Amino acid sequence: MSEIERESMEFDVVIVGAGPAGLAAAIRLKQVNPELSVVVLEKGGEVGAHILSGAVVDPIGIDRLLPGWREEDGHPFKTPVTADDFLVLGPAGSFRLPNILMPPLMNNHGNYIVSLGNVCRWLATKAEALGVEIYPGFAAASLVYNDAGAVTGVITGDMGVEKDGTHGPGFAPGMALMGKYVLIGEGARGSLSKQLIAKYKLSDGREPGKYGIGLKELWQVKPENHQPGLVQHSFGWPLDLKTGGGSFLYHLEDNQVAVGFVLHLNYKNPWLSPFEEFQRFKTHPAISRTFEGAKRIGYGARAITEGGWQSVPKLSFPGGVLMGCAAGFVNVPRIKGSHNAVLSGMLAAEHVAQAIGSGRANDELSSYEDAWRATDIGKDLKKVRNVKPLWSRFGTIIGVGLGGLDMWLNTLFGFSPFGTLKHGKADYATLEPAAKHKKIAYPKADGVLTFDRLSSVFLSNTNHEENEPVHLIVGDMELQKRSEHDVFAGPSTRYCPAGVYEWVDKDGNAAADPSAKDVRFVINAQNCVHCKTCDIKDPNQNINWVPPQGGEGPVYQGM
């Protein structure tokens, strides 16, 4: 495993990630067989610290996992959806699409507006009550394989490593947690998921993974501007008609409103900044009035899987499975994935429990891979499989219209005239040279409704030790200069929502422009909110995100 002597612990099942999928799997395992020993590793300092979502939750998964939860005190589903609006935004005005035009699957009535982080905290208490061990603050850094090439466990990250790689005075080696099966629920673009997909060729024969970046703020608004239960989705301005994305306002309890912006990462213009587009979006007259006299209390960003049905990799490998957003189970037009995450965790748990009950261990759970497309997860994703490729191919007006028609035909007749469309290029390959596009001049933040990135990162409670190794690994720094800077004008300085990346000249001035000379690439890793956008969008796939020390990164509250 390693030259370092490590403590080793044995479990029946090791789960990576205390999100909806991982916690649902843990709970279901103990429901099926209370004698199973189950451990959940979570890289955040506490359960929920790294969870970021809208979120409007379809309760189908929770209903199956925990029947009767509605009668319990203390559950986090406090705000049922009471109104469901869909707006098309123009530069100065907007109009509402009639709900009757929307396919039934887009209806949010019966769903709940929640903090998904609080849902995970609640699920963690349920899991622990059943005897599940949860270890927050421990990042799963690498995998353990047996001689046959099967996964048999994970190793948590070493603590106290200095920036130069030497062991500091507080060095503590990571632990090896060994299991009969390892379940991966680490979210979109997880580091272990990437390793497993590459090693076992799990994406062979599938469309490339597609992603968006989701940015979110939490606001405390004036009572007269608060409508508990209102769900408002929108698309259009400030994006042009060739760039995909959308936005939302969700009115929670306690005069809180979540506002968010999702940008598809297959955009072409390297001058575009997702963060700045989000700030511009809030200034639209249909949006800004909600925030008059309000106070911003939270900020975060996260990559979202958008490939859906066509891009889901093979989910089983020798010794374990992928679940939730690690598998890519987000329904893009619904902007929902947590319900499928819970369902996939339950499905994985049932197949694992059956295998262990039959005396099996560390083999491939092919039955899980064979089963998911016929479940409610598959049915949910198949109906919307063409929405993303139609939008990407035909733009916002025609593409969204065709996507709506396709959803109706799939809902009413179970077929699509388009069959199953391909996504085309991976997101990193869609970026075009800066010379092909006009530089975008974004307005300066006013500090009232719009903000800069550094003040936003402050609200995420992000923290990393300054003297630890940088967890954003640039493979070839000369390539980064020759291509990312000289050809694409340093898009990392714009697509990163946390101000991690800078190109600076010899005097320390910003120099993300192809005409600048004598520049160097600066990585402010301590700002990283673990969104993974750089790992996805770098045009040369030259940046690799790996976990920093356990417990570091953002500490989201109420997000």
Image: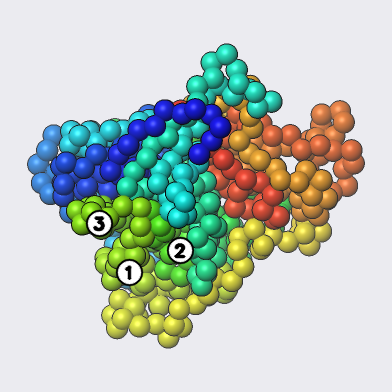
What residue sits 88% from the left and 47% below the top?
A: 515
- Position of 451 with respect to 418 (left or right) is right
Which of the marked residues, 1 or 2, is nearer the chain's N terminus?
2
User: Residue 61, percent across and down?
Assistant: 24, 54
Mark whose residue sits in front, 1 or 3:
3
Mark 2 lies on residue: 313
- Position of 533 with respect to 57 (left or right) is right
Above/below status of 532 relative to 219? below
Secondary structure state at the residue bearing disc 1:
helix
Mark whose residue sits in front, 3 or 2:
3
User: Residue 144, percent across and down?
Assistant: 46, 44
Instruction: Name the image quarter holding residue 30.
Output: top left
Q: CA distance from mark 3 to mark 2?
A: 22 Å
What residue sits 42% from the left and 35% below the top?
A: 176
Question: Label 1 amino acid?
Answer: Asp
Above/below status of 358 relative to 214? below
- Position of 512 with respect to 27 (left or right) is right
